[in-house]
Amino acid sequence: MIRANIVLGTLISWASYGLSDSPDTSSFSAADTIHRDIAIIGGGSSGAHAAIRLKDAGKTVVVIEKQAQLGGHVKTFTASSGVRVNYGPSNFQNSTAVVDWFSRFDIPVVPYVQPGVGDKYVDFTTGKEIANGTLPNPDFGAYLEVLSKFPYLEDYSHLPDPIPEDLLLPFGQFVEKYNIQSVAYTIAQFATSNGNVFEQPTLYILKVADIPYIMGIINGEVLAPATYDAQSVFQKAQDDLGSDALLRSTVSSATRSNTGVSLVVNTPKGRKLIKASKLLVTAPPMMDNMKPLGLDQRESGIFSKFQSKGFYSVLLNQTGLAKGFRYYNAKPAADNTYHVPQLPVLQFIWATKDVDTYWAWYTSVNELPDATVKASIIKDFKTLAPGSNPQIMVFSNAGPSGISVTADEIKKGFYKNLLSLQGYRNTWYTGYAWISDHSAGLWNYTDKVLVPKMTQ
């Protein structure tokens, strides 16, 4: 039975960046002023990839990244055994864009095999396994037949006008309309960062579990670096960029116009002024991130529509769980959520390459205090393994996730309006809220669309 044993590169670079408008640039010396063709806010999966591609195209770039390394939520932890353990995107669709990205740094890729020896479907509130046959065997053939009705889901720019009403339905209603109940539980695992999956507009769920994604799982066409260290390619990118990657840095103010952009950046070496011809923003387009950019009425009217969910990725040891197994949280009764528990919830737990380390994913409708999430996770682990003393080694707040708008906004042409901002005020954008849920789709967009436009 194929379940959610593989989650492809869907966790892109999600982070907050301090930005504000109208910087005072008069006090900066020549030594503290950086001139580049293109400034990039965010050095996650999208930002780091774009920086290298733009550099390779002959442009000078500078990346402002708040974390200590590039890669965003592509993260890897070194366990006490010395084994590198991923706790973000760990594998990628087999596409030209993916192969080319790893080849750029001479990193060999191999078919990805999910670590672990088997699956357990358990009610995490009781610790009891779900009886065999409770969860239906997913009929992906029927699901793919339904998906074929919507061949434009990989990129928001390909959406038809008007948007089909089916894509505006809450996904639960869509499941019932097309009789795809057998895949509902599994699709919910694939779309775990989207909050209450069955209440979300169908468009968002089908974009996560689109045809390339499903076919990659069915056919085993999923890739990983030979070392299984997903972060390694971003370390190579960081080395390549050198001092053009400003780590542990944030933008404090910005001015954008038709003649260029100016950014004041707080770095470990003090404030710097960046003057660039163009700006690429890869931070999530939530108002907390975007408003300080000095948004005009057109921009704020669009970005203010976005809403998001909470999503957390955690590594634990001393769990007492059966070695090598993957645990999926499931309700014994199907109800109207097809065995998927109500949020907030610990969705599933995976074995990793290190036998003593488990990787847990937690989802909530809204962002929660980290302490609340940690306590809930520990409680569930102790229910699954009474008498255990699970320890959190790494905790990552991967929000904001599931960035979306209401069905009514989609119907009124939200994405047409959003994409019209590309290039406006010398600012371009990329990230999953703009293009695709998958790294493969984002990197392909950068290669085929973004780089040609930004290098004109």
Image (cartoon, helix red, strand yellow):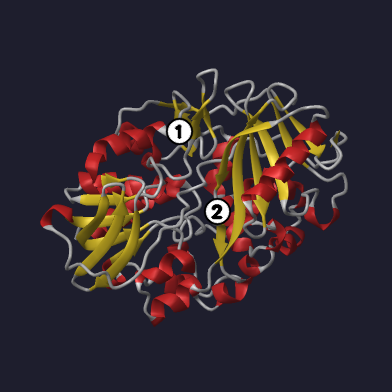
Mark 1 lies on residue: 230
Looking at the rendered structure, the kind of residue marked 2 is: Gly
Mark 2 neighbour density, 10 Å: few (under 14) some (14–19) many (20 or more): many
Image quadrant in which you'd find residue 324: top right
Looking at the rendered structure, the kind of residue marked 1 is: Ala
Q: Is residue 285 left or right of residue 267?
A: right
Mark 1 neighbour density, 10 Å: few (under 14) some (14–19) many (20 or more): many
Q: What residue is drawn where x is 32% and y is 71%?
A: 21
164 and 52: which one is in front?
52
Task: Report the disc number at residue 399.
Answer: 2
Q: Is residue 100 left or right of residue 59?
A: right
253 and 121: which one is in front?
253
On screen, residue 260 above or below 221? below
The picture places residue 38, in percent across and down from the top left corner, at 23, 56
Q: Is residue 139 visible?
A: no
Q: What residue is drawn where x is 28% and y is 35%?
A: 239
The picture places residue 86, in percent across and down from the top left corner, at 52, 32
Q: Is residue 437 visible?
A: yes
Q: What residue is drawn where x is 73% and y is 34%?
A: 327
Task: Report the disc number at residue 443.
Answer: none
Residue occupying the far left of the picture: 30
On screen, residue 358 above or below 276? above
Dot 2 lies on which element? loop
- Distance between the alpha carbons at the discs numbered 2 and 1: 20 Å
